[in-house]
Amino acid sequence: MHEIQHILHFEKGILYTIKALLLRPGQNIRAFVSEDRSRLVKPIIFIIVTSLIYTSITHFFHIEGNHGGPAHSATTAIMSWIESHYGYSNIIMGIFIGFWLKLMCRKSGYNFFEILIMLCFVMGTGMLLFAVFALVEGITGTNLILLATAVVLIYCSWAIGQFLGGKKFASYLYAMIAYLLGMISFTASAILLGFLIDSFNKA
């Protein structure tokens, strides 16, 4: 009940967090990490709640992904789990993105845990943006997945780059590259895991 009240609190809850992350994500996340952890919603709760909002909208409007694999393969099952559990999947994906960010931005001064906190906030906001596009798509019937993906990629690159410093173009470029590499390596790992499971079951 305490966590629910904190999320819904107008001055310190999810509405304040969303506004802060949309307007000045880097500045507000840096303040959360180093100074005041009371105003923003806890990062894990934030990404789970926002992912749940997106999942609820896509299920309501029957906007489902097409995995294109055999119905009973482990890879298809893993991809279906990812689609049904975006909150946990985003946290796992954040680990991959965080690895690339830490590797490419070693001089940023942030440790891996602080980078993961930042990614929970940024990716959670990204899920809200996806949710808005999914809502419009569900109402209008217009396929907006490519536009939504581009907007979320731009936002995440901007927010991550701002958190890392934001004074140089390289910060935003590294942020975009690390984000894309993290997504690719996460997806490749999921496919590889499914392939290994299928191969083991057939042996």
Image: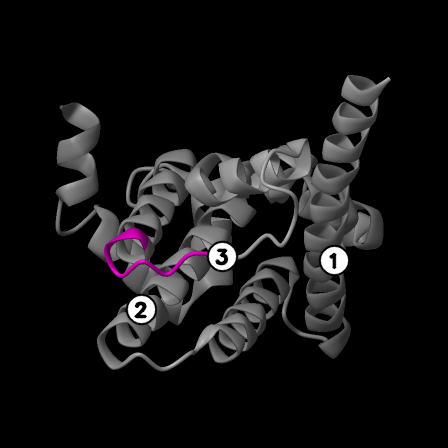
Task: Determine the image quadrant of residue 184.
Answer: bottom right
| Highlighted range, magenta | 59-65
* Most distant residue in the right direction: 203
- Label 3 to label 1, Cα distance in Å? 24 Å
Give me the disc on residue 178. 1
First along the sequence among labels 3 and 1: 3
Assign the C terminus to one quadrant of the image. Answer: top right
First along the sequence among labels 1 and 2: 2
Q: Amino acid at mark 3?
A: Gly
- Label 3 to label 2, Cα distance in Å? 17 Å
Q: Which residue lies at the image location 43% right of the left edge and 44% below the top edge? A: 32
16 over 194 or under it: above or below: below
Asked whether 117 or 134 is in front, the reply is 134
Q: Which residue lies at the image location 59% right of the left edge and 52% below the top edge? A: 67
Secondary structure at numbered mark 3: loop
Residue 109 in view, yes or no: no
Assign the N terminus to one quadrant of the image. Answer: top left
Instruction: Pinpoint residue 20: horizontal percent, then vertical percent.
Output: 34, 61
Instruction: Pinpoint residue 200: horizontal percent, then vertical percent.
Output: 82, 19
Task: Determine the image quadrant of residue 141.
Answer: bottom left
Tags 3 and 1 touching, CB below 8 Å = no
Give me the disc on residue 132. 2
Report if residue 191 lies within the magenta region: no
